[in-house]
Image (spheres, coloured by chain):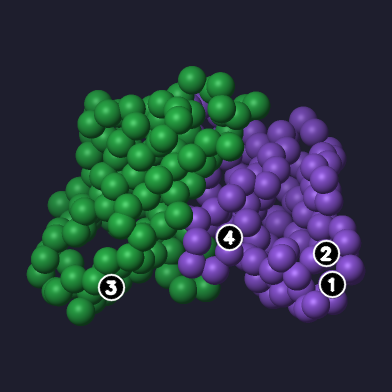
Chain colours: A green, B purple
Amino acid sequence: GAVVSQHPSRVICKSGTSVKIECRSLDFQATTMFWYRQFPKQSLMLMATSNEGSKATYEQGVEKDKFLINHASLTLSTLTVTSAHPEDSSFYICSARDGTGRRAANTGELFFGEGSRLTVL
Amino acid sequence: SQQGEEDPQALSIQEGENATMNCSYKTSINNLQWYRQNSGRGLVHLILIRSNEREKHSGRLRVTLDTSKKSSSLLITASRAADTASYFCATGNTGANSKLTFGKGITLSVRP
């Protein structure tokens, strides 16, 4: 199936630093990528929708200046957690939709990365 | 906001038994999808059922959709220990930018 690569899988940083997480679609063009946050034993909360070449659309309550999203190419979206604090510690997951519709029988399916566990000390 | 609500929240069964998980949602949808997540990993798409479909099969998986009751069920037959994971239903609408709204998830434990 389609592969979405997310990097790094784990990151530990000091409070106040910024952390960048990359999400790449390896074998398809992802016109749309989604960034989720997941707390332990809870569901995925959509943070923002990332469209190639345009500004991301953030969900209500998500700080745009805190969580910077860049979707500069059809295969790469990045999430930067700026000035991270311990409360930002979480599991961040990206997903991508195949813009050409060839990878899936329908365009409803999302392909997920393996997630990035952020721990802010 | 959460749209899908799964039940039960946790399910423990013996290997070989069938596992049935239910999902209810609130608004009209174009499709409903089920995903699986192993602990600490990303999500894997299992099956998608469109709003005009009532039942769909994929291997040991059987999904039903009742749009009048706004509910769906996922049946895993002849469960295996490797089926142990969290299962999420997600609802979606049309459009390339349409986002999925995930339920809270069901933790399935299959005892060997």
Q: Residue at x 72, y 34 (%)?
A: B51
Say which mark, if any, is on residue B15.
Answer: 1
- Helix or strand or loop: what does disc 3 sit on? strand
Give the residue type at disc 3. Answer: Thr
What subunit carries mark 4? B
Please state the chain letter of the residue tagged with numbered disc 1 in the rendered image.
B
Mark 4, secondary structure of its residue:
strand
Residue A57 visible in the current orientation: no
Residue type at tag 1: Glu
Using the image, tell me which numbered label, if any, was put on residue B79.
2
Q: Quadrant of residue B23?
A: bottom right
Q: Could you tell me if the residues under marks 2 and 1 are in contact, i.e. CB atoms within 8 Å?
A: yes
Q: Residues within 10 Å of mark 3 (few under 14, many from 20)?
A: some
| Front-most of residues B22 and B16 | B16
For disc 3, the chain is A
B76 to A57, vertically: above or below: below
- Is residue B60 shown to the viewer in this render? yes
Crowd class of label 2 (few under 14; some 14 to 19; many from 20; radius 10 Å): many
Marks 4/2: CA–CA distance: 16 Å
Mark 1 and mark 3: span between their CA atoms? 36 Å
Label 2: chain? B
Can marks 2 and 1 be said to lie on one chain?
A: yes
User: Which quarter of the rendered picture does the C terminus of chain A lie within?
Assistant: bottom left
Dot 2 amino acid type? Ser
Amino acid type shown at disc 4: Gln
Q: Earlier in the sequence, mark 1 or mark 4?
A: 1
Please state, as top left, top right, bottom left or bottom right, where the N terminus of chain A lies in the image.
top right
Q: For mark 4, does the 10 Å Cα neighbourhood hold few (<14), some (14 to 19), or many (20 or more) residues? A: some
